[in-house]
Amino acid sequence: MKNRIQEMRKERKITQSELAEAVEVTRQTIISLENGKYNASLMLAYKIAQYFHTTIEDIFIFGEEDL
Amino acid sequence: MVCLFGAGTGAKTNEEYKMVIKRKMKYNAFMLLLGGITLGFAGAACTGKLVMLSDYMLGVYIGVGFGLIAASLVNLCRNYRILHDEDRLKAERLRNTDERNVLIHSKSLQYAGAVTLFGAYMAMLAAGIYSEVAFQCFYAVVVAFMIFYMIIRAILMRKM
């Protein structure tokens, strides 16, 4: 599953640490999410979407292979 | 047990995590006691009044006893410092409740369990050639693993 976390974070000039602290995970988790090595849980996806004031679908892109 | 391994608590605030740390400190105290008992047992074996142990086994008991005591004291000090430092407490809480860390922790346990089961089974087969006692020991490990797996699975099936 692809995501736009890095893109949205850079648009808003937010560091990985700031995002990590806001959604209560470690910075390593944000790095893994951005690299596509780890898929967020529904709870974390919701927190990230709330942080960016958007919807989960706007950040996390479901492809055919994810279904 | 999860608390012992240090990941997977559901604490959402520092106050909740303080309770987790206090619980961990109780485990540490129990391990300290266990170390003391092990050393006491080794001490009793030294006198030859309670049991007789070979030099090798005596060394093992003394080593394990001191190891448990040292590890418990280190963890007790570490947890005490975390408990009295809000920044450390928050960092530790995030590290322990981080969902990626929790997933890594449970997958590690899952793989370690599978490797242990496979290893015990292979050792059981090999031990059967040389010693029936060794065979039965590994057989017991394999059977115990399967029984615990089924019990824990049944409990989780009801809970989740």
Image (tube, rainbow, N blue to C red):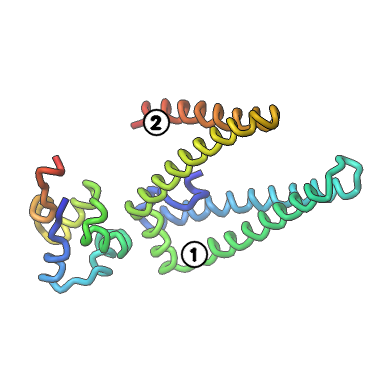
Where does the image place residue A36, in percent across and percent down from the top left?
Answer: 21, 56
Give the residue at mark 2.
Answer: B156
Residue B82 marker: 1
The residue shown at (66%, 60%) is B70
Q: Tell me where residue B149 appears, x and y as whole percent.
A: 47, 30
Q: Name the spot of residue B33 as percent of width and height, x first.
A: 69, 50
CA distance for labels 1 and 2: 32 Å
Horizontal side, residue A34 vs residue B16: left or right: left
Q: Marks 1 and 2: which is nearer the front? A: 2
Residue type at mark 1 is: Ile
Determine which of the numbered discs, if any, sits on residue B44 in the image. none
**Secondary element type, mark 1:** helix
Which numbered disc flags the more N-terminal residue, 1 or 2? 1
Query: Residue at horizontal 17%, vertical 60%?
Result: A51
Which chain hosts label 2? B
* SS of the residue under disc 2: helix
> Is B62 located above or below residue B52 in the figure?
below
Q: Quadrant of the C terminus of chain B?
A: top left
Tell me where residue B66 appears, x and y as whole percent: 71, 57
Asked if the residue under mark 2 is in contact with the one under mark 1, i.e. CB atoms within 8 Å, the reply is no
